[in-house]
Image: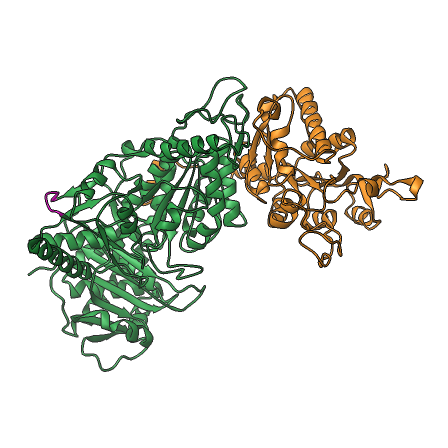
């Protein structure tokens, strides 16, 4: 049988080309029409340290990093020791015999990567040696990779021909060398290049461009893993007249500066991760209280405190939805795929302006650093963020009534005080109960303006539902596909709008006997929130710093479903 | 605004120094309005938390825009307002606790950026609104509600701190002289960079220093306030430092550097180097 996909993991020291190998493989594969997704974890240090990246190459769109490793490429003994148990029984382990000699594993084969690259006269062709070897293992036509090399290195320079020649030579050397080993994995089904235009992009970059597509014009940030790439992207691209991208001195400055800019009429955003999110707590409360539009992107990592800066987790949902003291519940969009990073960011900017308040976009380390091929985003689907602006004269009551009111912009008539103390309709501080009642209700009522009606739903007739959120969508979807083939009677629901939930979806979930929520945290945060809304939800939790394996979810969902069905029969 | 709103339940104590600061700010803004023709809504007053911060609600006459934010963060809020709309006149009002203690971390970065705003610091040497705890500018040894055995820490010297941080306009004033103070604030607003007008604004309830400041010659008390001499060279950093070594409370402009570009000017200078791209062009870079 032909293979539909395969997973290659590269492991070694930081700086050994572990990341570039995986990304190069993903790029070359997508170039010829396969789908690809990379998954990376880095050590939290500048140079060196154990690191690994894997690429999943597939004939079909890729949903998750993949459960098992088909090929492991290791650059040192430590890497082998830590990763060989993840390689499937009949998988292949390629070790760089230019670096070390691996003994005692009959799945392994030594490839003198550096020497082979050197022999082509191009030391930088090491990636191509590996690529050639991998292509042989899955019986990928040589021509695919030759085409990729010719396209990639045709850069209009004098040395192009030389570089192309050495890279093709490296491909061939890798291929012929591994052929001697007799190892093969099978034959990968031929690529079917999609007819639509595609991007190869990471989650952080997709967030950046998505926000700009909705009209972002002000960004400040403070470096923090894994959100830093958004700051760097903005500083290079959110530039020119009337646009600002700027590094400030702390996350406290980030949140308060975008609050000032939002007040002054700009569509404003910052991005951070766990610890920065904690520092923004008070500023978010102020934005909620004073009704100032702004967006905070939380690229989640393992927490609390410094936690696991370079590992993935979905443990900030409580912290994002209830980030501050007092009666606060913020609108939340959680992206589940790289594509949703784009559309989610655009929607977050639009939401903030629509309801005049803070919005949190949640992503995760595993999405942020994942390179994936996605269909070119459709800009006609993006709604430009537009604020209702006050255009009358002075003497305006900014906070009058129970509903959204147009917002005056400094420089124009309508001066008012945006007040973080409880206030009356003109923004003056008051401690009177009736004002606090009215303003509290006003702030919560505005969230209804954000209710959306689109959500994913399948097999709705089943009384047990699988409802993932955020980045667990991928593995959960892969598991759901398998469960359907197995004939398990479960339904599928998904939305990136966690607050407010699409009302129709919530209504349907309330009628289910059991809603199963796979999520990467200890407490079962989303299921807990769903239960508070009257849904019979239970979580499948994991807190290893890694994403779910689809296989784990298949087992657990099957177990929970069967147990519930048995119970129902007994009753 | 308070006059229009009988429910407003904040009042300064009788004789509070902040009344004078309020008057000085009103005068400076009106003066600016008359001179530039820019309407009052071109001004934004960003207030911290404490007695000082309530100034934003107590201004009389035509109203500027205002933000009454969170404790210690008036400066970075002002940073956002000013970077969003460099054409606005942005004023920060804060107390010594708000500005120097909880918000102290924001002074140095604004000085380094030369953020073009004016901060008016109302220094009363005490946390008044929370009823009399020691602040950075409380004298060492003072018994307050939070220092029953006397304040352990030394008193901060804000003017020297500003000079060391590289604040490009530093003035020192007194709330008991609203008109001269308004001229200092006006100069601060006109200065093309980060300006701080540090004002002695005594708390009549917890730390009444009016007599120490103004002196009482009949009873042999020399005034702590003294005017900066007319021949003081405000562009001379060393002269400014020497001035501050003389003790007491100088009144006037201490230091002024007009050669540095302000943050909005520096940002504008990047426009010619920048190559803004459309969203379509940005996406095109990822097409394969």
Q: Which residues are magenta?
A: A459-463
Side of A184 relative to B5 (left or right): left
Residue B207 shows in this picture: yes
Residue A295, compared with residue A537, is above or below; it is: above
- Scheme of colours in the image: by chain
Q: Colour of chain A?
A: green
Magenta highlight: main SS: loop
The tint of chain B in the picture is orange
- How many marks on residues? 0
User: Is B26 on the left-hand or right-hand side of A90?
Assistant: right
Give the quadrant of residue A4. bottom left
Residue A156 visible in the current orientation = no
Tell me residue A317's x, y (percent): 35, 50
- Write the residue at 17% across / 56% down: A143
Frontmost residue, B117 versus B182: B182
Residue positioned 46% across, 47% down in the render:
A281
Instruction: Classify B90 as above or below A245.
Output: above
């Amino acid at each position: 049988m032909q293979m539909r996909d395969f997973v290659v993991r590269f492991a070694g020291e930081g700086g050994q080309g572990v990341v570039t190998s995986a990304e190069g493989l993903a790029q070359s594969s997508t170039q010829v029409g396969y789908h690809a997704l990379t998954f990376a974890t880095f050590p939290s240090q500048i140079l060196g340290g154990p690191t690994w990246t894997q690429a999943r190459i597939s004939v079909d769109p890729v949903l998750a990093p993949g459960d098992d490793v088909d090929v492991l490429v290791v650059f040192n003994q430590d890497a082998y020791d830590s990763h060989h148990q993840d390689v499937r029984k009949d998988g292949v382990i390629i070790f760089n015999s230019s670096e070390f000699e691996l003994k005692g594993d009959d799945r392994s084969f030594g490839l003198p990567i550096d020497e082979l690259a050197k022999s082509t006269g191009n030391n930088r062709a090491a990636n191509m040696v590996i690529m050639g070897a991998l292509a042989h293992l899955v019986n990928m036509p040589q021509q695919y990779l030759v085409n990729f090399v010719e396209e990639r290195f045709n850069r209009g320079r004098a040395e192009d021909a030389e570089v192309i020649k050495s890279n093709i030579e490296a491909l061939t050397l890798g291929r012929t060398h591994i052929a001697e080993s007799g190892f093969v994995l099978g034959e990968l089904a031929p690529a079917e290049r999609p007819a639509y235009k595609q991007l190869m992009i990471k989650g952080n970059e997709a967030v950046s461009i998505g926000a700009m597509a909705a009209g972002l014009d002000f960004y400040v940030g403070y470096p923090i893993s894994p959100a830093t790439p958004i700051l760097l992207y903005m500083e290079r691209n959110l530039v020119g007249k009337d646009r600002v991208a700027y590094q400030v001195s702390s996350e406290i400055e980030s949140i308060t500066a975008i609050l000032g800019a939002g007040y002054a009429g700009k569509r404003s955003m910052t991005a951070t991760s766990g610890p920065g999110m904690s520092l923004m707590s008070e500023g978010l409360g102020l934005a909620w209280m004073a009704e100032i539009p702004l967006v905070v992107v939380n690229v989640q990592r393992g927490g609390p405190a410094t936690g696991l800066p370079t590992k993935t987790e979905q443990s900030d949902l409580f912290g994002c939805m209830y980030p501050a003291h007092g009666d606060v519940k913020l609108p939340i969009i959680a992206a589940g795929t790289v594509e949703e990073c784009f559309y989610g960011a655009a929607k977050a900017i639009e939401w903030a302006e629509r309801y005049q308040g803070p919005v949190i976009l949640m992503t995760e380390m595993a999405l942020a650093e994942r390179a994936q091929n996605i269909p070119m985003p459709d800009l006609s689907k993006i709604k430009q963020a537009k604020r209702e602006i006050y255009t009358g004269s002075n003497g305006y009551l900014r906070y009058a009534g129970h509903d959204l009111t147009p917002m005056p912009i400094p420089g124009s008539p309508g001066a008012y005080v945006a007040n973080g103390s409880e206030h009356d309709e003109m923004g003056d501080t008051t401690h009177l109960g009736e004002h606090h009642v009215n303003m509290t209700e006003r702030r919560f009522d505005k969230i209804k303006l954000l209710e959306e009606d689109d959500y994913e739903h399948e097999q709705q007739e089943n009384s047990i539902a699988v409802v993932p959120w955020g980045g667990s969508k991928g593995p959960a979807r892969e598991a759901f596909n398998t469960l359907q083939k197995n004939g398990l009677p479960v339904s599928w629901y998904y939305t990136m709008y966690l607050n407010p939930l699409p009302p129709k979806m919530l209504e349907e979930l309330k009628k289910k006997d059991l809603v199963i929520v796979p999520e990467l945290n200890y407490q079962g945060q989303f299921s807990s929130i769903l239960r508070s809304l009257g849904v019979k939800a239970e979580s499948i939790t994991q807190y290893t710093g890694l994403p779910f394996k689809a296989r784990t979810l298949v087992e657990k969902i099957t177990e929970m479903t069967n147990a519930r069905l048995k119970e129902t029969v007994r009753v | 605004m308070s006059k229009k709103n009988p429910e407003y339940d904040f009042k300064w104590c009788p004789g509070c120094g902040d009344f004078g600061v309020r008057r000085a700010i009103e005068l400076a803004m009106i003066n600016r309005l008359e001179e530039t023709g820019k309407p009052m809504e071109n001004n934004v007053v960003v207030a911290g938390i404490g007695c000082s911060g309530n100034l934003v609600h107590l201004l009389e006459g035509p109203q500027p825009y205002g933000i009454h934010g969170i404790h210690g963060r008036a400066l970075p809020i002002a940073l956002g307002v000013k970077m969003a709309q460099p054409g606005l006149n942005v004023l920060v009002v804060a107390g010594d606790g708000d500005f120097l203690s909880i918000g102290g971390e924001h002074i140095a970065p604004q000085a380094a950026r030369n953020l073009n705003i004016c901060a008016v610091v109302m220094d009363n040497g005490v946390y008044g609104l929370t009823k009399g705890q020691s602040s950075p500018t409380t004298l060492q040894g003072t018994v307050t509600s939070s220092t029953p055995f006397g304040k352990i820490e030394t008193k901060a010297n804000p003017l020297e701190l500003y000079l060391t941080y590289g604040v490009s306009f530093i003035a020192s004033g007194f709330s008991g002289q609203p008109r001269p103070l308004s001229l200092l604030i006006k100069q601060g607003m006109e200065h093309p960079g980060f300006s701080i007008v540090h004002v002695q604004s005594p708390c009549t309830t917890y730390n009444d220093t009016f007599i120490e400041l103004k002196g009482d010659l009949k009873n042999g008390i020399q005034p702590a306030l003294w005017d900066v001499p007319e021949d003081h060279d405000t562009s001379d950093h060393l002269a400014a430092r020497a001035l501050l070594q003389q003790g007491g409370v100088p009144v006037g402009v201490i230091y002024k550097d007009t050669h540095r570009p302000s943050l909005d000017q520096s940002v504008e200078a990047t426009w010619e180097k920048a190559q803004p791209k459309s969203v379509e062009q940005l996406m095109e870079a990822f097409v394969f």
